Amino acid sequence: MKNIFDTFPDSYIESSKRMIQTPSPIARSTFFYVQETGYLKLRESHRASRKNLDSYLIVLVLSGSGILMYENKTFTLTKGACFFIDCMTPYFHQSNSDDPWELIWVHFSGATTPEYYRFFSGLSSPVLMPGSFEELYQKFTSLLDVNKTSDLSSEIASSRLIMDILSILLQEIIKPKESPISHKRNLENVRNYLDEHYTEKFSLDELAEEFFISKYYLCREFKNLYGITLNHYVIAKRITLAKKLLRFSPYTLEEIALECGFYDASYFNKQFKKSEGISASDFRKKWIN
């Protein structure tokens, strides 16, 4: 029986391998978990076509070339390419007959995987050329290694490695586009200014005038460089200060609102609850010594 599952056709190089796993109840409810992970190297063209598969797939192309068809689009894949897809959506991939590929992959799932995928797909096409190729490759090979066994220890290690792989991919897609050094320095100056003056009242127009830049450029490029809107950056700074004051000062909520730059206690309460999920007064009660 072992040979039926663990060997490949003659079109595959002998070193090809795969591990199929059945997650434990705790892994299925709590962790990222492996459904299948593997490595293949081909002697000739290979194709795969699936749909309605309750799984997510990440593939790293180690050598060779081919195509991926997904969401009615065709993507060319070459060495160094990576794709991340939701396998409920029909997909098809095939290696080039003149340049058969070498792949390493993982089919996986987990309770929070749909949220990770929605974030990824909202910012990126399914295919990218990650600059962190070698780091990704090391994570995949480690994933293959730990799945030689099936126990709680390997499930925990697999969850951590899948999390690492997802984190690397998300870091890749939020990397700011290259911009002139002078522009980057200007935005760094803006952030430094905000770090010092975030409790003060100012408008976007005043900030743009202070640094001699368009407010539209400022909003766009600040988010591009730091991955957060300028407004959310300021509010997060104010909320962080508010949490410190709620825990370690005797100030009233009205005084804390003013100290943090909200200038309106009801707006402060609204923003605090939106950020933390509870009111400022409840936060204070839960954290008080």
Image (cartoon, rainbow, N blue to C red):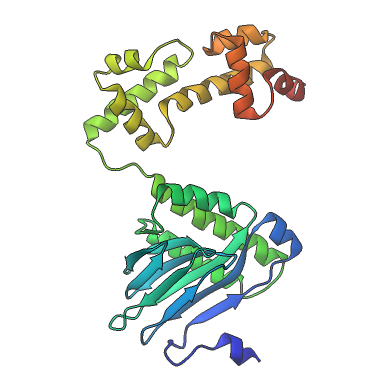
Q: With 185 as the anchor, is 234 left or right in this view?
A: right
Identity of the residue drawn at 60% across and 18% down: 242
Q: Is the residue 282 above or below the residue 224 in the image?
A: above
- Could you tell me how many numbered marks the image carries? 0
Quarter of the image where one finds residue 42: bottom left
**Could you tell me residue 130's position as x and y percent?**
37, 57
Q: Is the residue 94 above or below the residue 232 in the image?
A: below
In front: 79, or 121? 121
Q: With 91 as the anchor, is 287 left or right in this view?
A: right
**Could you tell me residue 234's position as x and y percent?**
47, 22
**Could you tell me residue 283's position as x and y percent?**
71, 23
Identity of the residue drawn at 73% across and 24% down: 287
**Could you tell me residue 49's position as x and y percent?**
47, 75
Identity of the residue drawn at 43% across and 87% down: 13
Q: Quadrant of the C terminus?
A: top right
In front: 90, or 250? 90
Q: Is the residue 86 above or below the residue 242 in the image?
A: below
In front: 130, or 247? 130
| Residue 170 appears in the figure | no
In front: 100, or 244? 100
Q: In which quarter of the image is the N terminus?
A: bottom right
| Residue 94 appears in the figure | yes
